[in-house]
Amino acid sequence: MKVVILENAAQVATYGAGLFQRQLQSKPDSVLGLATGSTPVALYNELIALNRDGEISFQHSRTFNLDEYLGLAGDHPQSYRYFMNDKLFNHVDIDKANTQVPPGNADDPLAACAEYEQDIAQAGGIDIQLLGIGRNGHIGFNEPSSSLASRTRVKTLTQATIDDNARFFKADEYQPHLSITMGIGTILESRQVVLLATGAAKAAAIKATVEGPVSAACPASALQLHRDAVLIIDEAAAAEL
Ligand code: GLP
């Protein structure tokens, strides 16, 4: 596991975007694994600018997102499909038919999870997977205690994650407690993994990820087992290393 410590969040976004730029330039039909949360937004803005300037194109790429709230359709403003359209897909030259987010409104969520795995496999696997990290060390919605071999499945959110994400929901708005998420085993199969973390609130999770034992207590610690994982973090997130 490689750890890159940079001064601030802007530098983290630029460095991370550079990895995606190189990936798309060397393989225009790359399969990209994408993430939601506030952390990747600055990276997406950089990719939008690179696309606008003609440096990169998404025309031949495919994308798979990590996770989605179960119970929210893609046009729901709090859904991760909506987020991805709003923060990236609507602003670049990607064919939306080539973008996949787990279907939060699937009639049969378990079947949808199995199909998602098949779709990733049929696409040839993920070339580069972007990750954020929860304060409790979750990746995607793989909460602590998730099996390190887990596949795409329905996962209950912990109260800590529900509380952390409550800021995105209005006070009287329904906030899902269930999700569909790629498993840790799914994530580990990506050829490259890029985890971004910024801010002091992530410092303890980063310490557990980098210096702790490989353990389901900190799902991100599984990245220690990956042969090409890079953590790009700012000084605040690195404070406990
Ligand atoms: C959510 C997402 C994760 C993300 C995490 C951290 O729980 N499912 O993929 O990493 O939030 O979000 P933020 O970057 O806003 O701290």
Image (cartoon, rainbow, N blue to C red):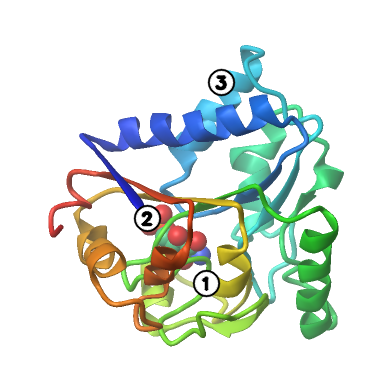
Residue drawn at 55 percent across, 53 percent down:
35
- Disc 1 Cβ-to-ligand 1 distance below 8 Å: yes
Q: Find out whether the residues at labels 1 and 3 contact each other: C-beta distance under 8 Å.
A: no
Q: Is residue 172 left or right of residue 31?
A: left
- 1 and 176: which is toward the camera: 1
The residue where tag 3 is placed is: 49
> Which amino acid lies under the numbered mark 3 shown in the image of this protein?
Ala
Give the image location of residue 166, x and y in percent.
42, 68
Residue drawn at 50 percent across, 75 percent down:
142
**Res 170 visible:** no
* Element carrying mark 1: loop
* Element carrying mark 2: loop
Distance from Cα at disc 3 to Cα at disc 2? 29 Å
Q: Find out whether the residues at labels 1 and 2 contact each other: C-beta distance under 8 Å.
A: no
- 218 and 3: which is toward the camera: 3
The residue where tag 1 is placed is: 141
- Disc 3 Cβ-to-ligand 1 distance below 8 Å: no
Give the image location of residue 198, x and y in percent.
29, 48
**Mark with earlier residue (3, 2):** 2
- Dot 1 alpha-carbon crowd within 10 angstroms: few under 14, some 14 to 19, many 20 or more: many
- 102 and 168: which is toward the camera: 102
- 49 and 228: which is toward the camera: 228
Q: Find out whether the residues at labels 3 and 2 contact each other: C-beta distance under 8 Å.
A: no
Answer with the quarter of the image where residue 71 lies: bottom right
**Mark with earlier residue (1, 3):** 3
- The relative height of residue 45 versus residue 142 in the rendered view (above or below) is above
- Dot 2 alpha-carbon crowd within 10 angstroms: few under 14, some 14 to 19, many 20 or more: some
Answer with the quarter of the image where residue 153 lies: bottom right
Distance from Cα at disc 1 to Cα at disc 2? 21 Å
